[in-house]
Amino acid sequence: MTDSATAQHEQLDPSASAYNTWVLRLYDFWVLTVSNLFAWRCPTKSSLLPFFTKHLGGDAHLDIGVGTGFYPATAAPKLAKTKTLALMDLNPGTLAYAEARVRAAGYQGTIERVHRSVFDPLPESMRGRFDSVSLFYLFHCLPGSFPTKASHVLASVTPALAPGGVVYGATILGRAAPHNWFGRKLIEVYNRKGIFGNESDTKENLEKALRAAFEEVTIEQIGVVVLFSAQKPISARP
Ligand SMILES: C[S@@+](CC[C@H](N)C(=O)[O-])C[C@H]1O[C@@H](n2cnc3c(N)ncnc32)[C@H](O)[C@@H]1O
């Protein structure tokens, strides 16, 4: 994607442009502490962070939709033997913020910044290299509905996987999930502003997209958040 195309894309897409410096400064408190505990009922420290670190490892990891870089920075000790960490996002501000945070946390390997949309096909140089690819709190930000938007994203990111690699992540479900009052309000406001695009997202339709693309899928729900992992891309079958 060219710089002007990227700028246009960000203008069109509040799912990425929303994350300015002020929002990033508040993000960990508001999203990872308050919202995850009280609105989504999926605690960061006891549920999401352990799920993030569980699949990390190997020579190279790709984190897509980086936000503040909380997960790779907090998991930096586990990443010590991982030679390359690629950070991919449509917003250049989040990329710079996350990279600085991961470095400050002591990660010594190579950090690659990839400034592009997850909907766009990956460059040739990223294909077949990554042992793990994380998509944390990305799907619910993207416009569109499951299974289509997930199938589109999986088609873009799957070529990045090394043999035996895993794609995994977490996403907040839409209106049909058992939201509490706080969660319903946030879903309504964020969807109206275009920060979220998850009104019709269901676990079943995400699972459809995952099972259409991978032989091995795990999917579990904690509160109104779905945690998923997928391995063995179906197109790679002989
Ligand atoms: C809710 S934040 C998630 C941050 C972090 N992964 C977490 O779980 O706390 C969503 C991130 O996705 C990025 N994003 C939104 N739309 C995107 C797109 N089409 N392609 C790549 N990144 C995108 C935003 O810029 C933001 O950094």
Image (cartoon, rainbow, N blue to C red):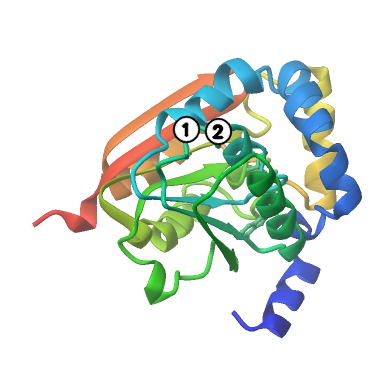
Corner quadrant of residue 111: bottom right
Q: Which residue is mark 1?
A: 78
> Ligand 1 closer than 8 Å to the CB at disc 2?
no
Residue at point 81%, 38% (across, down): 27
Q: Residue drawn at (63%, 28%), measured in percent from left and top?
A: 176
Q: Is mark 1 within 8 Å of ligand 1?
A: no
**Count of numbered labels shown in the rendering:** 2
Q: Image check: 228 left or right of 225? A: left
Residue 56 at least partly seen: yes
Secondary structure beneath label 1: loop
Q: Position of residue 205 (x, y in %)?
A: 46, 39
Image quadrant holding the C terminus, namely: bottom left
- Element at badge 2? loop
Relative to 177, is 21 on the left or the right?
right
In this orientation, which residue lies closer to the viewer: 52 or 233? 52
Identify the residue under disc 2.
75
Above or below, 79 relative to 181 = below
Residue 228 rendering spot, x and y as whole percentages: 44, 33
The residue depicted at 77 percent of the width and 49 percent of the height is: 195
**Type of amino acid under label 2:** Ala
Measuring from the top left, give residue 184's x and y in whole percent: 79, 27
Residue 42 appears anywhere in the view: no
Q: Quadrant of the N terminus?
A: bottom right
Q: Spatial distance from mark 1 to mark 2, Cα to Cα?
A: 5 Å
Whether pointer 1 and pointer 2 mark residues with C-beta atoms closer than 8 Å, the reply is yes
User: Dot 2, crowdedness within 10 Å: few (<14), some or many (≥20)?
Assistant: some
| Residue under the point 87% across and 53% down | 21
Q: Where residue 11 sits in the image (x, y, percent)?
A: 80, 70
Q: Which residue type carries mark 1?
A: Lys
